[in-house]
Amino acid sequence: CKPSARDRPFGYYRLGKVAEFKAGETFFPDYALAVRSDHGGLYAMSLMCPYDLSKLESKETESGTVYFSTSSGGVYDHMGKKLSGPSAADLPFYELSLRAGEYGGTRDTIFVKVGKQVSPGWRLKLGG
């Protein structure tokens, strides 16, 4: 991969309260992240091109949502799998946690650890 002049901001970022993520998908443009919920729990996918670290744009196609880089031309499907472009990697998924004691916020606050990659099947399991 071509090196980037920018670095992905690593570390813990406060995303919000658990109740805000009960259904569907939430985007965090400032962090270039999508947080989704499904039957298994919550997961976070990067929306930053792994080739050049540009923020990805989305568009609807006949086969569903795709994410693309206007810089490199890379295209990724809804689950981050590379469809085309120069990147050698799919979009990374990051660990989510409830870590209020260490990082501030109430007990039901969700944080993402950008830089701590997990498998696409990883989920933060929520009670109830």
Image: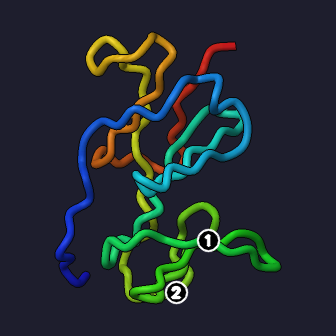
Which of the image's four quarters has the C terminus? top right
Residue 88 image label: none
Question: Residue flagged by tag 1: what amino acid is it?
Answer: Ser
Viewed as shown, does residue 120 lie left or right of 6?
Answer: right
Q: Is 20 situated above or below 83?
A: above
Question: Earlier along the polypeptide chain: callout 1 or callout 2?
Answer: 1
Quarter location, residue 5:
bottom left
As measured in the structure, the alpha-carbon distance from the residue carrying label 1 to the one carrying label 2 is: 15 Å
Residue for badge 1: 58
Q: Is 128 situated above or below 86?
A: above
Q: Residues within 10 Å of mark 1 (few under 14, many from 20)?
A: some
Quarter location, residue 14:
top left
Residue that appears at 55% across and 72% down: 57
Residue for badge 2: 84
Q: Nearer the viewer, residue 82 or 8?
A: 8
Q: Position of residue 26 (x, y in %)?
A: 61, 45
Residue 122 seen from this side: yes
